[in-house]
Each structure stands twice: as structure tokens, then as C-alpha cells.
Image: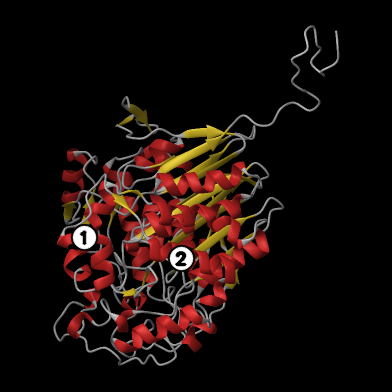
Amino acid sequence: MPREIVGRNAFPLDCEKQPARGARGVVCTNHPMATAAGTEVLLAGGNAVDAAIAALFALTVVEPMMVGLTGGGICHLRMADGRHAVLDGLSAAPAAATPDMYAPIPGSPPEDRETEGRRNAIGALSVAVPAALPAWAHALSRYGTWPLADVMEPAIRLAARGFTVTPYLSDAIGDAAADLARDADLAARFLPGGTRLKAGEKLVQGAYAETLRSVAKEGPALLHGGALGELMEDALARQGGIVTRADLAGVITRERDPIRGTYRGFEVFGPPPPASAGVHIAQMLNMLEGFDIAALGFGTPDALHLVAEALKIAFADRAVATADPDFVHVPVARLTSKDYAAERRGAIDLHRAQAWTAGPVLGESNCTTHVTVADAAGNIVATTQTINALFGARIAIPGTGLICNNYMHNFEPRAGFALSVAPGKRVYTSMAPMIVLRDGKPRFALGLPGGLRIFPSAFQALLNLLDHGMALQPALEAPRIWTMGNALELEPAIPETAEQELAARGHPVKRVKTIGGGINGIAFDADGMMTGAACWRADGSVAALGGGLARAGVRFSTEPNSKPDGTRA
């Protein structure tokens, strides 16, 4: 793709992917076959919710290291009638969980959450109560138009017939190979003959196809209280796990109102706690609203410095705004207020990096996936889902194809903290399925995987769109920065001159290959056209629907001298 000049200061950027544009719908996912699944549903008459859930089921097949029926996530909906809803399908600690169930390793950095035997990260005791499947079914039954069995058909085909392994999946298997080899089911599937699946090979998952068929027939209750849940309880108990069928049966999908912020005439909607994105993206936008970001220009030392300071402030405050609101008071109104942003902004020094007061250091997995879908009727879905770490707990439920999450790793393993383990407490998350309006109409929807780097990356994409005037593709592919107050990470395309200036201001600069995961999103035009895009950081693929049905009243005729309506001339 030719080099583009983006931003108002003519920053050169080589975009690696092409956007797709259409008026009848757009599907963006992090795998081409999942995008195909969602597109199939849109073409067959389903709405954006139907298509998004079909894509998620397909992703459980083609991105098994990222997402599954035993995981959790956030789904942000905007329906054609203007309703917003955030479906909280986040995993929770089992009823038998206790604050002291893990033994932290003395002297290890708190942010690493290291425990003896890695019991909070690998194996049965790291598994939290999954909530993804009921949330997907809830989205379908309340906001979709298709039954569960129909939206699952593409995923069942992919599992039964197989698909071509991508380099991305092959590399992920290699990264987790040592742990996968310890689980007979996972080793047989991903390390046949002791060697990881190579890019270009075919992966067939017959046992998982049968599980999907059973779920399609019996619904989420099969896992959440039924026979499949009993299999999961028994398999985990044999390995020291504590998730029970009663835990599974008690899962409830919460509908929450989104956090609403404003920025230079735009309305920005994001998920509320336990997700941190809505609160802290609103907070950071409020802080930067007092600066002329557009005039500073994309990628300049001043603009990057302000983004870095805003990130550090947000992470300093984030410790009080990320826990389950059923367990911890979250001062949402204060954190998202313009007055509080003005106080924080007033302490920023444009010429010097600062250390901001921070609470407990937080961490979470990069191994997540994101789907963005819109249909011609005006329905929009932005949803981020995960089994937490790469291949989750790295154990499977034998004979089912299910890979367990390791969501317990998101909790603080020490007792006495806001994020400590408690029975029934939902995990916190940085997931950032965002939707932006202008004059009451949708303008952008986007999201990405990437753990702690999710909402900072989404925030920067929004600045690219709203301040720097970028088109969607470069806005998503543009280089990112990230910091929590320690090293300031820079992606390769950030100029060397900017790096030197940031270091001179006191930022401990560190170059990294990537920050966050593969972002995808949709831009909405006033004429009804939609543009979808996905960046280079994952296998992101986009499909946009054009064309349509024949003009009303037109019939084909083989009769000579026939008129367009089929009658004789």
C-alpha cells in the first residue's frame, strides 16, 4: 500500500491493509473466517447482533488461544432506535474462592502476581466461573433476530471441516508449547507428534464440533448447570479446581449503562466498571480537551508527552475504578467530571515528565479478541472477549474441545486489596468496545485486544480520528505509545527525533515491536456509507456489503421484445 500522509502535520505512514466500504453492513474481526461467518449471517438477513455472535462462535474455533465458551467479555450495543447497552459477561471468582487461596512469592514484583506453582495462572485453580456463553445467548434473545442454533452453524462447519492455520496461530502455539504439552487433549490438538501445527496446515476439531452441536440444540444451560457443566466440574476437581456446577448455574449476564463522555462536540460511550475503559478514556479526553492537540500534530514530542502524562494519571487513578462495583465503591462521577480533569490538567508540565501518585499496580492478559459489526438498519455491536491468557489455563475439558480460562490471574493474589479474591467477585478488565456519536448519530465504533494496553490504544485511535483528522485505516494503524508510569514504550514508527526529545523530558523510553493488539472498527458517513478497517497487529479482516436485491417489479424474461416488467413489447 502506498505511503499515506496523515494528520494535520503530514506524518508519513505506511498502512499495511486496505479498508472496505459499503452501505449494507460491515463485519470486522481478527480472523478472515470469523469475518466470513458474520458476513454470511448479514447476507442471509440477520442483524448486527446475530452477525457478531456468529463471528464470536467462529472465533472460538479459529482463535482458540484467545476466546472460548469458557471465557468472558464485554458487549457494547447501540441499536437502531438509539438504545445503548453494555452486556457484562465477565467471569467471576467461584463460591469456594478465598482471598488467601494463593501463596504469593515473597519479594516478587506486585505487578507480576507471581504465586507458588503458578497456581493462579496455570491449571485448574486458575479457572474462574465462565460467563461468555450465557451473555452471547442473552444478546441474541434480547437484541438479535436469529435463534442460537442458526448463528452457530458457521462455527460448527469450521470445527468439523477444519480451517487453515495462520502464522499467528502457529506462533501462539509455539509460545505456549511447554504448557500445552502437559495436557493430553491440547497436545493432541495443537502439538501432533510433539510438533506445533505449522502455518498452512489444516486443523480439524471434531470433538469441539460435537460440543457446539450439543450447545446449539440444548442452549447455554448445557454448560451452565447441565451435563457439560458437570463434565467441567469433575475435570477441574480432579486437578484441584473449585468451579462447581452450582457456580456455573448461577451465572447472570448484567446489563449496564455505558459511561458517556464528551469531547469537542462528540459523545464518547464506553463500558462501565468492572471495565475501566469508559471511565478512564472519558477522564483522559477531558484532560486533553484543554490542549490544542490538533495544532500540536500527530507524533510530535509535545503531543506524545501529553498522551503519556494522561496515561500515567489515568493508571494512577485506575486502582479505585476497576473492581466489581458490587464489592468496591467506584467514584465514577468524580473521575469523569470536567472539574476533576481540570485539576489534573493543571498539574501537567509540558516540558517535564512526572511521577503521578499511583494505587496498586494492575495487570492482565494481552490474549483477547474483538469484533465490530454494523448493519444497514443502524444496529452496531462492539464486543471484546477472552479466555484471558494465551490458551487460558492451558488445560482442556477432555473430550469436549473446551479450553479453560485463567481469569483468576486477574485478581490480586494478596488479601486486603480492592482487587483481592472474593467469592462471586467479577474480574476487572481494560476492554474498550467504544462507540462515538456526533449530533446524535454514530460516527465510529472500535475496539481491540491487548490487556492493560487496550484502553490506552483505543484512546489514541480516538485522538487520531477526532483531533488529527485521520481516515479510519491510518487512525488504526498509526504507531502507539504506552506507559503506566515506568518505561514509556514506543512502537517502531515513532520518529527517532521524538524519542530523543521525550527522553530529554525525563521519560525512560523503551522501543517495542507492538503495543496492544489488532484493533478494528467502523466509520459511519452521513450518506449511510460505512467503512471498516483492521490494523496490522493481528489477522484482522473486514468485509463490507454493497449491492443488494433487484429493483422492485423487475423480472427476467427470455421472450423476445419483452419489456422490463416481463410483458411483451
Nearest to the observer: residue 559 or residue 525: 559
> Around disc 2, counting alpha carbons within 10 Å, would you say few (fewer than 14), some (14 to 19), or many (20 or more)?
some
Can residue 500 be spotted in the picture? Answer: yes
Which mark is on residue 192? 1
Quadrant that contains the C terminus: top right
Q: Quadrant of residue 208?
A: bottom left
Chain-order first, disc 1 or disc 2: 1
Does 33 appear above or below 241?
above
Nearest to the observer: residue 300 or residue 73: 73
Q: Which residue is mark 2?
A: 210
Nearest to the observer: residue 92 or residue 46: 46
Please tell me which residue is depicted at 31% across the width and 90% down the height of the picture.
415
Q: Position of residue 374 (x, y in %)?
A: 58, 46
Q: Position of residue 114 (x, y in %)?
A: 20, 79
Can residue 430 be spotted in the picture? Answer: no
Please tell me which residue is depicted at 29% across the width and 40% down the height of the picture.
300
> Around disc 1, counting alpha carbons within 10 Å, would you say few (fewer than 14), some (14 to 19), or many (20 or more)?
few
* Residue 306 shown left or right of residue 70 in the figure: left
Q: Residue furthest left?
A: 107
Q: Quadrant of residue 506?
A: bottom left
Cα separation between marks 1 and 2 = 21 Å
Quadrant that contains the N terminus: top left
Tell me the colour scheme of the image: secondary structure
Q: Secondary structure at mark 1?
A: helix
Q: Position of residue 536 (x, y in %)?
A: 32, 42
| Amino acid bearing label 2 | Glu
